[in-house]
C-alpha cells in the first residue's frame, strides 16, 4: 500500500450492520422470554437508550458491566416490563447478537482483497462473547491479522491506553502509517486522534462532525478506502 501499513477496523456499524443484528437478537429474545412483540417503535427507543449508555462507557462514567445491564433495565422499565429480567436477558443477548451477520458495503470482499497487502486488525469495544461469534460467523476471524477487544485489553476506545496496548502487540510501526476506520466519532475517530494515527470516518448517512475528533478521511462507502490507502 502506498500510504499505510496497518488498518485498524471497527466492527459494529463499520464492517457489520449492527442495527440489523440488534433488531434480530432483541426480537427473537422477546419471543423466547415471553415478552410479546417488540415493535419497530420499541426498537427505536431501545437504540436511543443503548447509544446513551455506550457514550457513558466511552467517557469513563460507567463500567462495561454497568452499561450492559443498565440499558436493558431502563428500557424494560420504560416499556412496562420487569427490569429484574435485565441480567438474564443481556447474557442471552450477547450470544444471540452474533447469529445475524449483515455486511456493510461488501466489507468481507474488501477485507479479503487487502489480505497480504496491508496488515488488518479488529479494534472493538464489543463484548468478547458477541464479537468472537460475529467474527467467526462472518469469516473475518480468518482474514484479520489480529483482534483487539476492550474487555481483554482492559481499556475502552477512545482511551489512549487501549491503543498503546494494541501497538505493544502489533510491533514497531510508524503511527502516521496506521489508519483507523470506524463509524463512531466518539470512539473510533477520537481514539485515533488521541493515539496519533490517521483516521477515516465511515459516514454513510452524511452526518456532521460537531466533535473534537480529527477526521483525516471521510467515506460514504467502505470501498472508497482503497483510494485512500
Image: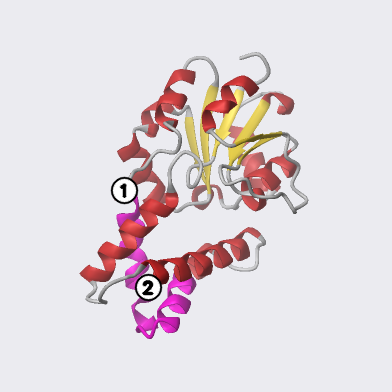
Name the one closer to the observer, 10 or 227.
227
Residue 87 numbered mark, or none: 2
Q: Are marks 2 and 1 in contact (CB under 8 Å)?
A: no
Q: Residue at x 57, y 21 (%)?
A: 226
Give neighbour class at mark 1: few <14, some 14-19, many 20+ (Cα, 10 Å): many
Residue 63 in which image quadrant: bottom right
Task: Find residue 102 and report its horizontal and vertical position in percent.
Answer: 36, 42
Judge left or right: residue 147 versus residue 58. left
Please tell me whether mark 2 sits on a helix, a strand or a loop.
Answer: helix
Q: Identify the magenta region.
A: 69-98
Residue 183 in which image quadrant: top right
Quadrant of the rendering where the C terminus is positioned:
top right
Task: Find residue 148 and report its horizontal and vertical position in percent.
Answer: 51, 40
Is residue 96 on the magenta stretch?
yes
Marks 2/1: CA distance?
A: 22 Å
Is residue 93 on the magenta stretch?
yes
Task: Find residue 94 and report its horizontal and vertical position in percent.
Answer: 36, 58
Q: Which residue is mark 1?
A: 100
Amino acid at each position: 500500500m502506498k500510504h499505510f501499513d496497518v488498518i485498524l477496523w471497527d466492527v459494529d456499524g463499520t464492517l457489520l450492520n449492527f442495527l440489523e443484528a440488534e433488531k434480530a437478537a432483541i426480537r427473537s429474545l422477546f419471543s423466547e422470554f415471553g415478552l410479546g412483540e417488540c415493535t419497530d417503535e420499541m426498537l427505536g427507543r431501545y437504540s436511543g437508550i443503548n447509544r446513551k449508555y455506550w457514550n457513558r462507557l466511552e467517557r469513563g462514567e460507567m463500567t462495561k458491566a454497568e452499561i450492559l445491564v443498565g440499558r436493558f433495565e431502563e428500557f424494560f422499565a420504560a416499556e412496562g416490563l420487569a427490569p429484574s429480567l435485565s441480567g438474564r436477558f443481556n447474557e442471552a443477548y450477547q450470544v444471540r447478537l452474533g447469529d445475524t451477520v449483515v455486511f456493510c458495503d461488501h466489507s468481507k470482499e474488501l477485507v479479503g482483497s487487502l489480505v497480504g497487502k496491508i496488515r488488518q486488525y479488529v479494534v472493538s469495544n464489543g463484548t468478547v462473547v458477541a464479537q468472537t461469534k460475529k467474527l467467526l460467523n462472518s469469516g473475518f476471524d480468518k482474514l484479520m491479522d489480529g483482534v483487539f477487544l476492550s474487555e481483554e485489553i482492559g481499556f475502552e476506545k477512545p482511551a489512549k491506553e487501549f491503543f498503546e496496548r494494541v501497538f505493544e502487540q502489533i510491533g514497531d510501526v510508524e503511527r502516521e502509517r496506521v489508519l483507523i476506520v470506524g463509524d463512531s466519532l466518539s470512539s473510533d475517530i477520537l481514539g485515533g486522534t488521541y493515539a496519533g494515527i490517521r483516521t477515516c470516518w465511515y459516514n454513510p448517512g452524511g452526518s456532521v462532525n460537531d466533535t473534537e475528533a480529527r477526521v483525516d478521511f471521510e467515506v460514504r462507502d467502505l470501498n472508497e478506502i482503497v483510494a485512500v490507502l
